[in-house]
Structures are given as structure tokens and as C-alpha cells.
Image: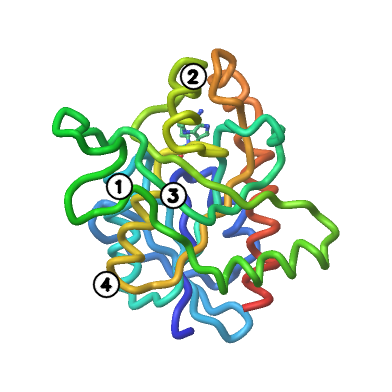
Amino acid sequence: MKKLAIMGAMVEEIEPLLEYFENVKLTEYANNKYYEVNYKGLDIVIAYSKIGKVFASLTASTMIEKFGCDTLLFSGVAGAINPKLKIGDMIVANKLCQHDLDITAFGHPHGYVPEGSVFVESSKELREVAKAVAKEMGIEVIEGTIATGDQFVHSSEKKDFIEKTFQADALEMEGASVAVVCNALNVPFFILRAISDSADMDAGFDFDEFLKSSAKISADYLIKIVDKL
Ligand SMILES: CCCCCCN(CO)Cc1c[nH]c2c(N)ncnc12
């Protein structure tokens, strides 16, 4: 690995990560801030994209194409679909889809466009490292499907649609676009999310209450994975 990208969507998702680093160099580029650091001999670029698939695609592409990252880890929070996932629990994505991508009018399945695919798989190798770290730390991390869309989901109807259509375990607003970018550019990627809410009518309140603590849970585990790379 030449250079590692560590990405979040919100400043609150990368703040707990930046706390681990010193002598950080800031570069402003394409309406975004990129933090560069050398951590235990490893060159790392850290950034938060801003919310949603478009910003996440721009930042992931920039970290790879402009900053030369050849591995990308994402740390953040998500809404739970799988009832096993409680607030503060973590999910590692083995595959991701776009729940709001819809040309079903032409007989295509939800989440599909021609020459694309409904699901994109993350790096098995990175997931194996994460599993080993979880074992060492004595923590339980669920592996599952993450559905991404450009909406904050706060209704059982929407949540149920996503569950029924994609058998997703959690949902958020950036992961699948990071997956498409990394897959296209042949960069192994890993998406880690800690649960902040249950994507139901209470999601807005729970998100506000648990964003910081869940973002820290994800960050603290991610750093242990970085130490193992
Ligand atoms: C100011 C409000 C910013 C919301 C950003 C939420 N992120 C998006 O990645 C994760 C997330 C946590 N819970 C969610 C939910 N219920 N629906 C969509 N996304 C999420």
C-alpha cells in the first residue's frame, strides 16, 4: 500500500480520527479540505466529503486520482435496518447498493442502470483484517449489506422498502458511491459504520443525540485496523 485514504462524510465523523494524528498538513482543493499525515511510516490522507453520494464520489475520486491513495477506508455512522443492530453497534459492508437509483419504468430492478450492477462488493482482504482486529479487541462487528441514497431515512415505510428490495442491514448516504468509484479505479475499499439511529420516525432525534458517540466508536475501531495494515 502506497498511500491510505481515510474518509468520512461529516466533520463529526473524521474529528475523532484526526485526534490520533499530529503534524497534519492541510490542502484545500475542489471545495474540500484534505489532511495529510505520516502515521507510523504510513502516508495517510483524511477528508470528509460533505453529505450525499455526489460529494462522496468527488472526494473519493480526488483522494485516489489527485492524492494517489491506493486503499480507502470509510468511517461514519448509519441508520439500522437489521433489528440486531442497536445504537452504537458497528456494521462492516460486504456489499453496497443505491436504493434511490430507479429506472424500473423500463423493467430494470431497483438500484440498477445498464452497464452497472445493483451491488458492489468491498475488499475481502480488508474485511479479514477488520475481523482479526475485532477478535483481538473482543468486540462483535456485524458484516452485511449497506444501502445508500440521497435521503436521510426517517420513516418505517422507506426503511421497509429498502429492506424488502435489497435485504439491506443498514443505510446511509455515501457508501455505495465510494464503492462505485473505488471499484472503477481498482482501489480496495472498506466501509465501516456505527449505528446512530434506526431510520424510523425517531431517527432525527437519535441521530442528533448519538452522532458524536457513534462516530467515535467507528473511529476508534478504524484506527486499530489502520495499525494492522
Ligand atoms: C445533518 C443530517 C446529516 C445526516 C447524514 C447521515 N449520514 C449519511 O451518511 C448517516 C446516517 C445516519 N442515519 C441515517 C439515516 N437514517 N438515513 C440516512 N443516512 C443516515
In three-dimensional space, the C-alpha distance between marks 3 and 1, rounded to whole angstroms, equals 17 Å
Please give the residue where the numbered disc 1 appears in the rendered image.
55
In three-dimensional space, the C-alpha distance between marks 2 and 4, rounded to whole angstroms, equals 35 Å
In three-dimensional space, the C-alpha distance between marks 3 and 2, rounded to whole angstroms, equals 20 Å
Rendered residue at 34%/78% (across/down): 68
In three-dimensional space, the C-alpha distance between marks 1 and 4, rounded to whole angstroms, equals 15 Å
Is 5 left or right of 135, judged from the image as shown?
left
Rendered residue at 66%/66% (across/down): 130
Q: Position of residue 77 (x, y in %)?
A: 56, 41
Sort mark 1 into few (<14), some (14-19) or many (20+) by Cα contacts within 10 Å. Answer: some
Q: Earlier in the sequence, mark 3 or mark 1?
A: 1
55 or 156, nearer to the observer: 156
Q: Position of residue 38 (x, y in %)?
A: 53, 79
Point out the image quarter for the C terminus. bottom right
Residue found at the very far right of the displayed protein:
138
In three-dimensional space, the C-alpha distance between marks 2 and 1, rounded to whole angstroms, equals 21 Å
Tag 2, which secondary structure?
A: loop
Q: Amino acid at mark 3?
A: Leu
Q: Is mark 2 within 8 Å of ligand 1?
A: yes
Q: Earlier in the sequence, mark 4 or mark 3?
A: 4
Q: Amino acid at mark 1?
A: Phe
Please give the residue where the numbered disc 4 appears in the rendered image.
65
Which of the two discs, 3 and 2, sits closer to the camera? 3
Please give the residue where the numbered disc 2 appears in the rendered image.
154
Q: Earlier in the sequence, mark 1 or mark 4?
A: 1
Is 84 left or right of 30, judged from the image as shown?
right
Q: Amino acid at mark 4?
A: Glu
Q: Amino acid at mark 2?
A: His
Sort mark 4 into few (<14), some (14-19) or many (20+) by Cα contacts within 10 Å. Answer: few
* Marker disc for residue 96: 3
